[in-house]
Amino acid sequence: MHAEGLLVRGGELKIKEMEVQCYLFVLLGSTLFVDKSRDRLRPAINLFLKDHRRLADYAWGAGALAYLYRQLGVATRAGSKGLCGCLTLLQAWIYEYFPLFRPSQLPQSPDAPRASSWISPRLPGGDEARQRLVRYRQLLDELSADDVTWTPYGRDGHTDIPRSLYTGPIRFSDIAEGYDPSRCLRQFGYRQIIPAAMTVPHDQYRPASGSSYIVFWDPWVNQLWDNVAARRLELDFASRLCEQPSEIVEEYVDWFLTRSHPRITHPTDGEPQPRPLLVHQVSYDFLLLFQI
């Protein structure tokens, strides 16, 4: 849907309301809910802009995260090219947790957005881009627990934002994705244990061709977000505080390796060959951090 189409269909709106609605439509479509069409925006966004008085009632952060989770899933499908969603959020998250990949940072006021302090690196091209990609894959495969900043927002960040301990599906329009903070308890300063089973959809559809997929949830999941008391992870009940930032229970390694690809570089892709996985190197679960 082209943004100018909203102007054509806004005949009954007052001009100021229409201008605000168009601005928000373009803003959200080009920041939080980006797709690959370049000059088009998702029409679902407009469903949330019909009544400007309700804009503050929506969990825009949760919606953007659900949309980004879906796009990360789509990007792993064979034949998929590129990545959609709020990539500024993804980049800032990487910089906060993984010092090896951080660009330079500017001093900034505590009230300013954290993501705006990072200086965007120059994008290489050609052979330089390919060499950097190989190097990044090697760094990820060699990542150790000491290479992760587990609590970049402090150990008590979740007390300021109780919703960060919500567990259950998060949604944007027809997209619903699982959100389970127990999969990375170390971000709260707690020892990592084997997480409980997640709430799962009752059905899903993945076409044989193409990279998209559809997930079907039961209607009752729509009520979980508002049930804070029942859907909040109790940290003290789930685990205990870490003595070391990367502390885990011993059986967590076996659980993780049966559910993940711990390395990015294929063993036949040349030297160096992947190192043996040691217990103190289990921070390969950086991939599971995308679940937080």
Image (cartoon, rainbow, N blue to C red):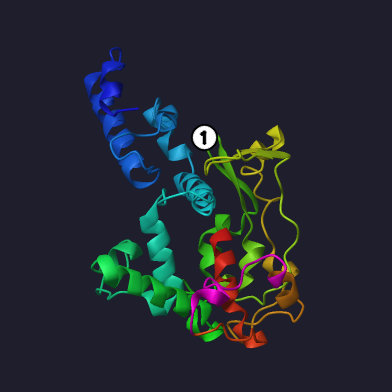
Tell me if mark 1 has few (under 14), some (14-19) or many (20+) residues whose alpha carbon lies within 10 angstroms of its own.
few
The secondary structure type at the circle numbered 1 is loop
Is 136 on the left-hand or right-hand side of 144? left
| Above or below 55: residue 110 | below
Where the C terminus falls, by quadrant? bottom right
Q: Circle 1 sits on which residue?
A: 173
Where the N terminus falls, by quadrant? top left
Is 34 on the left-hand or right-hand side of 73? left
- Residue appearing at x 53%, y 54% in the figure: 76
Give the image location of residue 71, x and y in percent: 49, 48
Instruction: Examine the rendering and report whether any part of residue 257 can be seen.
Output: yes
Q: Magenta stretch: dominant SS?
A: loop
Give the image location of residue 66, x and y in percent: 52, 47
| Above or below 284: residue 114 | above
Q: Quadrant of residue 110?
A: bottom left
Give the image location of residue 33, x and y in percent: 40, 43
Instruction: Examine the rendering and report whether any part of residue 109 can be seen.
Output: no
Looking at the picture, tell me which residue is in the foreground, 283 or 80: 80
Q: Which residues are magenta?
A: 257-271
Is 244 on the left-hand or right-hand side of 35? right
- Residue appearing at x 68%, y 38% in the figure: 217
Is 229 on the left-hand or right-hand side of 157? right
Q: Answer whether residue 38 is magenta in the image.
A: no
Q: Inspect the image, locate mark 1, and give the three-letter code of the amino acid beneath it.
A: Ser
Give the image location of residue 127, x and y in percent: 28, 70
- Residue appearing at x 26%, y 66% in the figure: 126
Looking at the picture, tell me which residue is in the foreground, 111 or 128: 128
